[in-house]
Amino acid sequence: MKAMKKFLALLLALAMSVALVACGGNSASGSSDTKTDASDNNGADEDYTATLKLAWTVGYDEKHPYTVSAETFKQYVEEKTDGRITVDLYAGGQLGGDADMMEMLQLGTLDVAVTSTPTIANFTDVMVGCDMPYIWKNDLGAMYSVLTDGEVGRQLLDRLQEETGIVGVSFLYQPFRHIFTNKAITSLADFQGLKLRCMQTPVHQEIFSTLGMSPVALPYNDIYSAMQNHTIDGFESDAVGAVTSKFYEVASNLTISAHFNNTMVLLMSDKALSAMPEADQQICMEAGEAAAKASYDCSVANNDAAIQTLKDNGMTVSEIDMTDIYAAVQPVIDKYSESIPEVKTLVEAAAAATTND
């Protein structure tokens, strides 16, 4: 499958190159306005202008890591280029769903996007390691040290580009996800037979099945009514999302699980990036680093505040003995580590980072 993906990516790149030569194109995207040709990229930076489209599927919320990341990228790029490059933001799926955006990035009809690793996994398996359960031990700082400060993160982003033709600018962060129910969860035994709504991602459903639960595929917006109607027994979400959706009205118990982090990635079209002068390319990469730090800070601050809000609204927050749970999911981690080298590398790096802490 990887060979086929690489072959298709090469064909796509060739087609794009031919189209650019034939049209004499020089803009950062199909809709961007530029004053210089790509051949002039080594000229003075002040001669180059562009308008980039940056899209994501979550609604615009100034406290959400998606929005914070996008706004940080926009502000950094526009300030550092003195407004020569501007960034237009499209929230809430205005330009399509996550899979649509991935394809648009490959085609060069979208310039920048924020999406999550479960979506990327449908295009390449190099990011599957980000969805391995419990490897970060509820330590977002350890995750940041590996994916942003360490070499492993950059290696994964480079492999992403090799596999898809899309530039991985930086990893972005959200709070860890936990289990919400109307009964106390104190041990692995309490998971057995629990009808749990989770994301419609094969590896996620495999994880919860391994823990003895019955995964239920439902849109996120259907969680509230499904809990009311007892269609599901519980769901998994981060605390910030639970507050925003007022899930404390339909669930009374939050079990700190931190099974995984719905890791985000800031992606950029190779067409858009390569059309820029080198100095502006560097600015975009630096903007990605700034967005990573902003999303991390936002996630840490908002997670603590959200958990307190859930408590204030009557929700019981409880811990669970993770020993048996870690043991139960280890075969899943081993399975993916043995078949995907990038997963093994990331799992080992996570283990080292959490042990050192």
Image (tube, grey):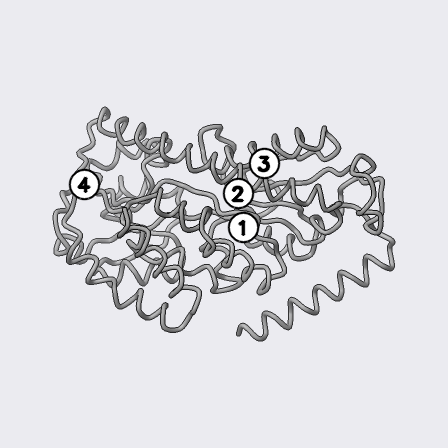
Which residue is at the front of the view, 190 or 164? 164
Spatial CA distance of label 1 from label 2 is 7 Å
Whether the residues at callouts 3 and 4 have beta carbons within 8 Å, the answer is no
Spatial CA distance of label 2 from label 3 is 17 Å
Disc with the residue nearer the chain's start (1 vs 2): 2
Spatial CA distance of label 3 from label 4 is 40 Å
Considering only vertical position in the picture, is 257 above or below 302? below
Residue type at numbered disc 3 = Phe
Which residue is at the front of the view, 304 or 159? 159
Residue type at numbered disc 1 = Asp
Label 1 sits on residue = 98
Q: Position of residue 318 (x, y in %)?
A: 16, 39
Q: Secondary structure at mark 2?
A: loop
Spatial CA distance of label 2 from label 4 is 30 Å
Considering only vertical position in the picture, is 341 above or below 211? below
Considering only vertical position in the picture, is 266 above or below 23? above
Q: Which mark is residue 57?
A: 2
Considering only vertical position in the picture, is 126 above or below 305? below
Residue type at numbered disc 4 = Asn
Q: Which image quarter: residue 215?
A: bottom left
Q: Which mark is residue 182?
A: 4
